[in-house]
Image (cartoon, helix red, strand yellow):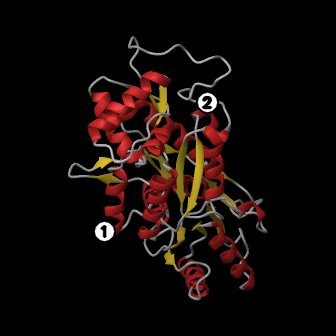
Amino acid sequence: MTLSEPALLPAQRRERLLADLRTHGTLRVSEIARALGVTTVTVRRDLAQLADEGAIERVHGGIRLPRGADTPPPLPAAVEDPGRPAGGDEATRPAVGMVVPSLDYYWPEIIRGARDAAPDAGVRVVLRGSSYDDVADVRRQASWLLETVGVEGLLIAPPTVGDEAAALISWLAGLAVPVVFVERTATVGPYQEHVESVSTDHAFGASLAVRHLAAEGHRRVGFLASASSPTTAAVRRGWRRTCTDLGLDLDGTPEVISSDHREPGWGDDVDRAIDACAATATTALLVHSDREAISLIARCEERGIRIPRDLAVVAYDDEVAGLANPALSAIRPAKYTIGETAMELLSKRIQGGADRPVHRVRISPQLIVRDTSRVPGPR
């Protein structure tokens, strides 16, 4: 590339960019940024102005001269066109960033889905782990991907509760690169416009669990979930709404928002839930997540409570539910599909630019019936 002079004014940058584009036919955003010594955010601002003026056309991962303009001959067949969305060596593909709150529970399958979809999108994934509620760390990871790697889009699962999280979401929504939220939804601005997202319909998943338990004859279905999970609110909403819709008795039915299963208070919380079930003749529980459900069943066994004859249990997540003894019935979010769909959505946003309508994709989970929710023979 010939873009090499430092400290150019914006107009000079755009002039050099067009000159180099006439020579090469297509350019990638990351290549332009490296050659000019500026961030991809700066480059995208220049490209936005040039596109508005009709001087360039956007293609996947980069730009080209408008059709019919003075372009060089086509690239030889042996040379891959960098504007094509797929193929080629992974190291040569444009990068997109992915920031997730966990690398060892729930999220690995989402990551796999996104990575498997990346070649067809013509990109590669650069992964960063953060935490569920550390706003500063999420912003730090995203900034590193933008400024150091020069990613051309972000898949991210930011915190969504509180003023600091709201400021982070506004910052993400205002970036010059496309952003897709994964397993998170949010709105921004004075008109509460939606951020592009792909998420599980967790309330529907809870509804599946309650309807299954009601079909098994249970008239009181309790709820136990960790306060630390961002999914708890949606699962609780679906549980409560479906109990009401089915006419199940909610008056006095246990509803326990517990500490994390690794914290000292968890044992007291699970005993409180079991005691409340016995006191109210509650015969079924929806528990979020698998780890809490497995711990609950172990405590029930210690107290002589038979699963599922005395208490039926459905877990939410299905990460390790099938490995429990007895095997846990569970709601299974389509985690691989979440990652795959998020990558496809990001790719279309990169190609479609600002004119593409904002998409919010909600994917339904499945009910997996195992041993903890269906009693053989009459109750």
Badge 2 crowding class, 10 Å Cα cut-off, few under 14, some 14 to 19, many 20 or more, is: some
Q: Which of the marked residues, 2 or 1, is nearer the chain's N terminus?
A: 2
Which residue carries the number 1 mark? 163
Relative to residue 350, is residue 266 drawn left or right? right
**Residue situated furthest top in the rendering:** 68
Residue sitting farthest toward the front: 5
**Total residue callouts:** 2
Residue at the image position 68 percent from the left and 77 percent from the top: 295
Helix, strand or loop under label 2: loop
Q: Residue at x 33, y 56 (%)?
A: 171
Quadrant of the snapshot with the C terminus: bottom right
Q: Is residue 75 above or below residue 152?
A: above
In this rendered view, identify the residue nearer to me: 348 or 378.
Answer: 348
The correct choice, above or below, for 280 with respect to 102 in the image is below
- Left/right placement of residue 287 relative to residue 43 reads right
Residue beneath disc 2: 86
Please tell me in which quadrant of the rendered image residue 33 appears.
top left
**Callout 2, which amino acid?**
Ala
Q: Amino acid at mark 1?
A: Asp
Q: Residue at x 56, y 80 (%)?
A: 273
Few, some or many residues within 10 Å of mark 1 (<14, 14–19, 20+): few
Q: Is residue 238 visible?
A: no
Of marks 2 and 1, the one in the foreground: 2
